[in-house]
Amino acid sequence: MNILWDFDGTLFDTYPAYSRIFSHVLGGRAAEVEIYKKLKVSFSHAIDHYGLSEEQIDEMNRLEEKLQPADIVPFESVEEVLKLANKNVIMTHKDRKGVLAILQYYGWEEYFSDMVTIDDGFPRKPDAASYRYLHEKYGIDLAIGDREIDLIPANELGIRTCIFQGTSKAADYSLASYDKFQNIIDFDLLKKENL
């Protein structure tokens, strides 16, 4: 199975750190739990919702750059899923340097055959161009993301989708935790046997 992964909120639990930064920039005028919900839609959604100025966005970017790889924690059992896959690729709006620093910190760079980052010049999700590129190169079987915006491009290309810690009509599967991933594999094997 070849898997396309989103990064933030899918491989790594980055939203708590981003929510703290957002709250700091807002001067504490919004609860981190509420910010978290807005960020799960998208960063631009949260920025628009709270009406951040250019100066505040710049401050957020500066604070985000100060995050250390140790501040970004992988989700429990996700490494076991990475080991199960034939190939793993990443599509993220993060910069390549930041992604590589985190992967290297955890010793995970060996799990990934390729990645598309914001540095590669593809349009942002939900545009399917970056997914198409990775799919044509690797024959993606499953796309995993934590937001609907991560699944829409895969749907457009006919790739099965899995939403992590959420719900979406765009998802073929949903997972609350990665220790249940085997159920997806078993389900697909069962479907094939019944054909």
Image (tube, rainbow, N blue to C red):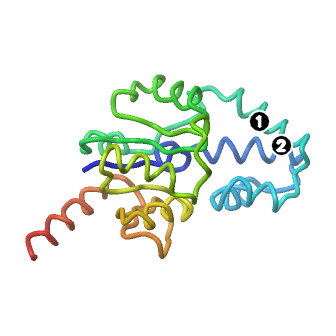
The residue sitting at 40% across, 27% down in the picture is: 109
Q: Where residue 188 appears, x then y in whole percent? A: 20, 66
In the image, is 105 to the left or to the right of 38?
left
Rendered image: mark on residue 61: 1
In this rendering, position of residue 57 left or right of residue 156: right
Going 81% across and 62% down the picture, which residue do you hit?
A: 49
85 up-or-down from 175: above or below: above
The residue under the point 45% across, 52% down is 131
Asked whether disc 1 touches disc 2, contact meaning CB atoms under 8 Å apart, the reply is yes
The secondary element bearing badge 1 is classed as helix
Residue 111: x percent and y percent? Answer: 34, 33
| Residue at image coords 30%, 42% | 80
Measure how far apart labels 1 and 2 are at the Cα level: 6 Å
Query: What amino acid does circle 1 point to?
Result: Asn
Q: Position of residue 121 (x, y in %)?
A: 61, 40
Left or right position of 9 against 62:
left
Q: Quadrant of residue 60?
A: top right
Mark 2, other Cα within 10 Å: few <14 / some 14–19 / many ≥20? some
Total number of numbered labels? 2
Horizontal arrangement in the rendering, residue 174 relative to residue 125 (left or right): left
Quarter containing the C terminus: bottom left
Res. 76 image quadrant: top left
Report the front residue among 118 and 194. 118
Label 1 environment density (alpha carbons within 10 Å; few <14, some 14–19, many ≥20): few
Amino acid under disc 2: Ile
Q: Residue 27 placed where, x, y %? A: 90, 46
Residue 57 - label = 2
**Rendered view: 183 above or below 59:** below
Which of the pair 22/99 is nearer the observer? 99
Dot 2 falls on a residue whose secondary structure is helix
